[in-house]
């Protein structure tokens, strides 16, 4: 039961917040506060403070403009504190994470009367490793002879003049307390390749043995996390923590209330987290490098005892594995019929998919041999890492000095990570799928590999439902999932299936404050071209687009295929083409900035974009007065995970088109329409150049799931 004390605390905080900011209560926001409080505030706990009974999960779809962050924070912060739990707010994007930490929570503290502390939690990869920076700036490079043997592991030591300048600037800023070692607070954009040389991961970090441990940006940030009421992080960090059993980096899930904002991303993030891949040629090259490097290392440093015996075992095993990799490469090359295809972001991905996730027997046999080999290699590197750890602790008998162990540990840690990744891939690639569960999707991708092509082997779960149910919903003290798009075709069924929401989960839709019918119009013109005939449809868009958007200052045109986007652009008259900014030529942020500048200068501007422009792009007012959608955004037909899911549903007597393709497309279409109204003052129109919403049986359901704009259908 929700206590009257907690109820009045939440109501009081909301009233104070509205009054301080001279705001009127929003119906949807009030409703959301009530729904979240009702579920999370009524959790029963046992004597040890652990949740007693069914999982406590609430999913709330809240339209744009509801003020979701305020609603869930006002409900969840007092609820978590009253239960003696920590609140973890997880987002899918860095932009929202930063907005919550830098704007929303400070604003709430100032104006609601709630008293709480908060911190931002990021992965180790967002922080500088001081030891790596020291190594890169060392003169003479006397101590880096070992590291040079491991260039493949990202320990490239040569530093050019530009990098030297950057790294020296970093040391100076750190020394003068003008930078905290966080990538996101460095004043300029950092190149990924530069940053990769400056950061580390769990397997390469020597922890408290590191001479820079006291100054370590990552450990300082982690220490700050242990004392706060609210931790803001991202979905990946929560999933990584749960994969380690929970409570490894973030608080124990049993003592945590979770909020998953942008929660529609969670199932895909979870699938990505448990997907594996390896590249055959580059892994064979790496094994060759390992064999050569460790043979050289042993010649330079004869190692006594168990450590020596273990290291001596690696070159021969690496040589055997390399030969097996080459057998696998030849077998895949002979078998694969690589079909050209695009992914959702329009990148070319020639693939060979194993139907139903079933891999031919001869490939399974080769894969099992690789699995065994990488299992042995992983065991060797694990044992070596343990002995190096003992040596760092000063335990005698390892035959290696502690300073030497400190230098070697990150190098062998990097080797361990790669060996383990390969072992996980071959395990997932060759395992027999349980009879009643969804199978793994398995496929090969043709990859660029320098001068030579490479073959990437992939294995991925097709649903994250069971993983999320087992590791998150059933364990957490309580959880809220929220987003502007959780339902598909006005139902939570799709999300329940993909996210594995427990049967006891409460679902609710709260309305947006926008008056869609007054603010916008949805048009479906008759182009006299069927979208399934790509050439005719593209020609019709080229013909009609300039006339359709001539009245708008800022226009966003969304495509489902990079090929069609490029063909339309190429087909437009040269003069008209000058007003178009096409996704992919510049970074996403630069493209948006350029578009805004043109509109600010009074020039018309048209953005051409793909899936990532249909979501999370914020263009209020004149920046986006017209959204043109080329097609109903059905999934790319050759996406291996979606195709395997469709096969599985069909094998069980379902209809994958109606159960997956239509709901997914409906959801993406709602997200695309969500680009039009970003504030209550916005006005504009949406044009859908796909008459299947009128002519096909499923079209009516898709049309009725869209926001309630005025409709003009030709």
Image (cartoon, helix red, strand yellow):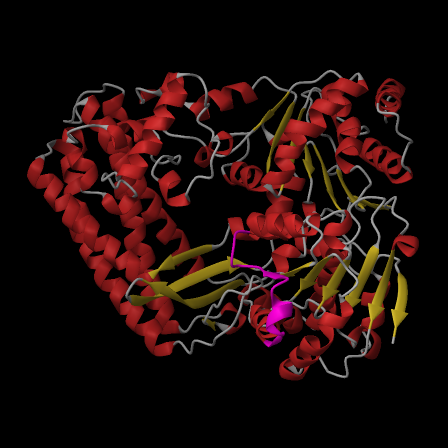
Which one is in front, 300 or 590?
590
Residue at the image position 80 percent from the left and 16 percent from the top: 113
Q: Which residues are magenta?
A: 571-587
Residue at the image position 34 percent from the left and 38 percent from the top: 197
Q: Is residue 359 visible?
A: yes
Q: Position of residue 433 (x, y in %)?
A: 51, 62
Q: Which part of the image, by quadrant, shows the C terminus?
A: bottom right
Q: Which part of the image, by quadrant, shows the N terminus?
A: top right
Q: Position of residue 140 (x, y in %)?
A: 15, 29
**Residue 433, placed above or below residue 698:** above
Which one is in front, 634 or 391?
634
**Residue 41, placed above or below residue 485:** above
Q: Position of residue 22 (x, y in %)?
A: 88, 25
User: How many numbered marks appear?
Assistant: 0
Q: Quadrant of residue 133?
A: top left
Q: Position of residue 119 (x, y in %)?
A: 60, 24
Residue at the image position 73 percent from the left and 15 percent from the top: 115
Which one is in front, 477 or 517?
517
Q: Quadrant of residue 85?
A: top right
In the figure, is residue 342 to the left or right of 528? left
Residue at the image position 31 percent from the left and 41 percent from the top: 414
| Residue 24 belongs to magenta span | no
Q: Is residue 648 visible?
A: no
In the figure, is residue 521 to the left or right of 493? right
Which one is in front, 221 or 458?
221
Q: Quadrant of residue 319?
A: bottom left
**Residue 292, placed above or below residue 163:** below
């Amino acid at each position: 039961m929700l206590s009257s004390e907690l109820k009045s605390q939440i109501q009081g905080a909301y009233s104070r917040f509205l009054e301080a900011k001279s705001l009127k209560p929003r119906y949807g926001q009030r409703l959301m506060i009530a729904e979240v409080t009702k579920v999370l505030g009524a959790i029963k706990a046992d004597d040890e403070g652990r949740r007693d009974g069914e999982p406590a999960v609430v999913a709330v779809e809240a339209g744009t403009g509801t003020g979701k962050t305020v609603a869930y924070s006002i409900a969840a912060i007092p609820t978590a504190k009253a239960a003696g739990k920590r609140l973890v707010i997880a987002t899918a994007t860095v932009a929202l994470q930063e907005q919550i930490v830098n704007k929303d929570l400070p604003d709430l503290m100032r104006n609601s009367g709630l008293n709480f502390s908060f911190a931002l939690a990021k992965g180790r990869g967002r922080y500088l490793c001081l030891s790596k920076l020291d190594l890169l700036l060392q003169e003479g490079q006397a101590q880096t002879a070992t590291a040079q043997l491991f260039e493949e592991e990202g320990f490239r030591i040569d530093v050019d003049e530009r990098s030297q300048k950057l790294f020296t600037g970093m040391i100076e800023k750190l020394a003068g307390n003008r930078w905290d070692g966080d990538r996101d607070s460095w004043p300029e954009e950092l190149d990924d390749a530069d940053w990769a040389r400056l950061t580390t991961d769990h397997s390469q970090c020597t922890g408290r043995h590191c001479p820079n441990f006291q100054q370590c940006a990552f450990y300082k940030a982690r220490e700050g996390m242990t004392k706060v009421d609210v931790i803001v992080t991202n979905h990946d960090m929560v999933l990584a923590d749960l994969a380690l059993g929970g409570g490894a980096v973030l608080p124990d899930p049993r003592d945590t209330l979770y909020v998953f904002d942008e929660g529609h991303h969670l199932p895909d993030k979870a699938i990505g987290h448990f997907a594996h891949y390896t590249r055959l040629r580059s892994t064979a090259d790496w094994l060759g490098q390992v064999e050569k490097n460790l043979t050289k290392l042993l010649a330079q440093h004869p190692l006594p005892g168990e450590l020596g015996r273990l290291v001596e075992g690696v070159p021969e095993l690496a040589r055997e594995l390399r030969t097996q990799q080459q057998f696998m490469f030849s077998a895949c090359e002979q078998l694969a019929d690589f079909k050209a295809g695009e992914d959702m972001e329009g990148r070319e991905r020639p693939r060979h998919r194993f139907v139903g996730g079933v891999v031919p027997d001869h490939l399974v046999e080769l894969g099992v041999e690789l699995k065994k080999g990488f299992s042995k290699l992983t065991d060797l590197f694990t044992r070596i890492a343990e002995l190096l750890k003992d040596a760092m602790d000063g335990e005698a008998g390892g035959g290696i000095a502690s300073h030497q162990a400190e230098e070697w540990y990150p190098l062998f840690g990097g080797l361990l990570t790669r060996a383990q990744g390969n072992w996980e891939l071959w395990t997932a690639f060759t395992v027999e799928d349980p009879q009643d569960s969804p199978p793994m999707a398995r496929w090969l991708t043709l990859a660029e590999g320098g001068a030579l092509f490479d073959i990437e082997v992939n294995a991925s779960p097709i649903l994250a439902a069971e993983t999320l149910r087992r590791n998150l919903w059933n364990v957490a003290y309580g959880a809220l999932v929220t987003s502007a798009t959780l339902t598909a075709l006005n139902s939570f069924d799709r999300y329940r299936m993909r996210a594995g929401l427990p049967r006891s989960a409460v679902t609710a839709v709260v309305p947006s404050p926008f008056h869609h019918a007054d603010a916008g119009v949805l048009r479906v013109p008759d182009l006299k071209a069927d979208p399934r005939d790509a050439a005719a449809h593209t020609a019709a868009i080229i013909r009609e687009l300039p006339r359709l958007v001539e009245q708008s200052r800022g226009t966003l045109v969304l495509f489902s295929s990079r090929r069609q986007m490029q063909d339309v652009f190429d087909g437009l008259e040269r003069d008209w083409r000058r007003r178009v900014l096409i996704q992919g030529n510049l970074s996403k942020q630069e493209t948006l900035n350029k578009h805004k500048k043109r509109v600010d200068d009074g020039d018309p501007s048209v953005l051409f974009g793909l899936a990532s422009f249909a979501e999370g792009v914020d263009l209020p007012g004149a920046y986006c007065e017209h959204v043109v959608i080329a097609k109903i955004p059905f999934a790319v037909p050759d996406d291996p995970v979606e195709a395997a899911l469709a096969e599985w549903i069909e094998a069980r007597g379902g209809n994958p088109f109606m159960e997956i393709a239509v709901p997914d497309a409906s959801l993406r279409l709602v997200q695309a329409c969500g680009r039009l109204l970003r504030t209550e003052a916005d006005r504009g129109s949406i044009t859908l150049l796909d008459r299947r919403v009128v002519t096909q049986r499923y079209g009516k359901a898709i049309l009725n799931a869209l926001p309630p704009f005025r409709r003009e259908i030709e």
